Image (cartoon, rainbow, N blue to C red):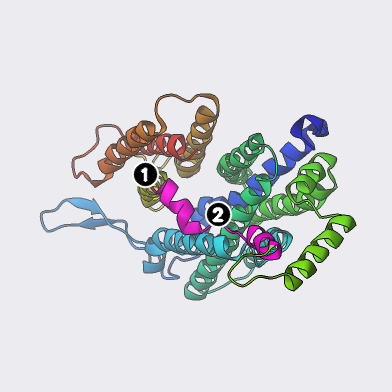
Amino acid sequence: MTAINSPPDKYNAVWIIFFILGLGTLLPWNFFMTATMYFTSRLRDPAPDADPLNNTHNGTWIEVDTRSVLESKFNNMMTLCAMVPLLLFTCINSFIHQRIPQKLRISGSLSVILVVFLITAMLVKVDMAPVPFFTVTMIKIVCINSFGAILQGSLFGLAGLLPASYTTPIMSGQGFAGSFAATSMICAIASGSSLKDSAFGYFITACVVILLAITSYVALPKMEFFKYYADTSSPKPSSDEENTMDLLNKDAAVTEIPGEKTVGSLTEEETTHTVSVFAIFKKIWVMALSVCFVFTITIGIFPAVTVEVRSSATKGGAWEKYFIPVFCFLLFNLMDWAGRSLTAKCTWGNPILHTKQCHVSASRLGGGWTTRAPMPGKEQPLWIVCLVKTANCCLCW
């Protein structure tokens, strides 16, 4: 069987399913990350709010931070609890993929993520003290990123059975996840409901999307196009072939000559040959380290730093509550999607040279966060991080 004889992907159903699965891969983390306003509001001290302005010894008034300790540390801890499990379980998945069936890894990960979001939606209506709420939230973030790493690795392995073009819907779905989460949060705020009611509807929306991803994965093996490539990638020996192999093994056992390899041993060596993960890493270490360094810059400033940016132009106005969802999350994720789409349509130059250029560009842009000089533009930091994200995706995709 060849790709020429493969059945058509009717209505692009398999493509759409992989897009939905890609959406479900990064949607959990993006929904938690975008809901920082809700989480931090639950971490405020019950004491009356202090005066945000403080009089100094020379009579000038300065703005002071009135947030609680948990509220001020939430974004940093959220990023830490997300990225460390993501790294660990991505590495673990490369070793357990041969021991745990792919179906169990994908369906199990999606099910756990769905349960976590259902618990999150229920806790919106439950009053909790700041410390227990902070602890439970961090545990949930660890869970969704641990199982999200397994889901992501398994999903790309599943797409490897199909033509190379079917990796694109996974990447597009991942890029759309952030924009979808940001748009959902903006709609929840625009509804005019209370913060708790908006958060409840927000997390229920995530549950619906994850449930849609589970349904899509269940329907995938029934697609004729997918079954064709799945059967081609894992052919099963016929009954005649099995009988022939049994005879070869029996003859080899009888006619075995000391010091020489038999037909049975040669066959066994061929079937048990595996490729070492370290051997693969030796060939891709330059690109792998470049991706690692660029992600270090991007994740180092988003979302822990970018959510702390405030606009003086919208302060006290009706648009103040939309500033972070629009400029921090929506704009950032749109640039993420643009970077992925740009490299899918345009390729230029030597890959190694292109990697170095993107790496240097992202490093110089990211370095702007370390300078102590004031920036002339009020929203300039957010435009910088958008350029960082675009360079990030141009390299990683």
| Residue lying farthest to the right in this orientation | 239
Q: Is 153 contained in the magenta span?
A: no
Q: Is residue 284 above or below residue 364?
A: below
Occupied quadrant, residue 269:
bottom right
**Total number of numbered labels?**
2
C-alpha distance separating marks 1 and 2: 23 Å
Amino acid type indicated by mark 1: Arg
Nearer to us in this view, 120 or 235: 235
Q: Is 268 contained in the magenta span?
A: yes
Residue 144 location (% of width, % of height)? 58, 61
Nearer to us in this view, 162 or 107: 162
Report the mark closest to the observer, 1 or 2: 2
Q: Mark 1 near mark 2, Cβ–Cβ under 8 Å?
A: no
Q: Main secondary structure of the magenta part?
A: helix
134 sits to left or right of 58: right
388 sits to left or right of 85: left
Secondary structure type for disc 2: helix
Region rendered in magenta? 263-285
* Mark 1 surroundings: few (<14), some (14-19) or many (≥20) residues within 10 A: some
- For the question of whether residue 305 can be seen, the reply is no
Residue 330 location (% of width, % of height)? 51, 39
Residue 84 location (% of width, % of height)? 45, 63
Residue under circle 1? 310
**Residue at the location (65% across, 55% down)?**
203
The numbered mark at residue 188 is: none
Along the polypeptide, which appears first: circle 1 or circle 2?
2
The numbered mark at residue 29 is: 2
Occupied quadrant, residue 116:
bottom right
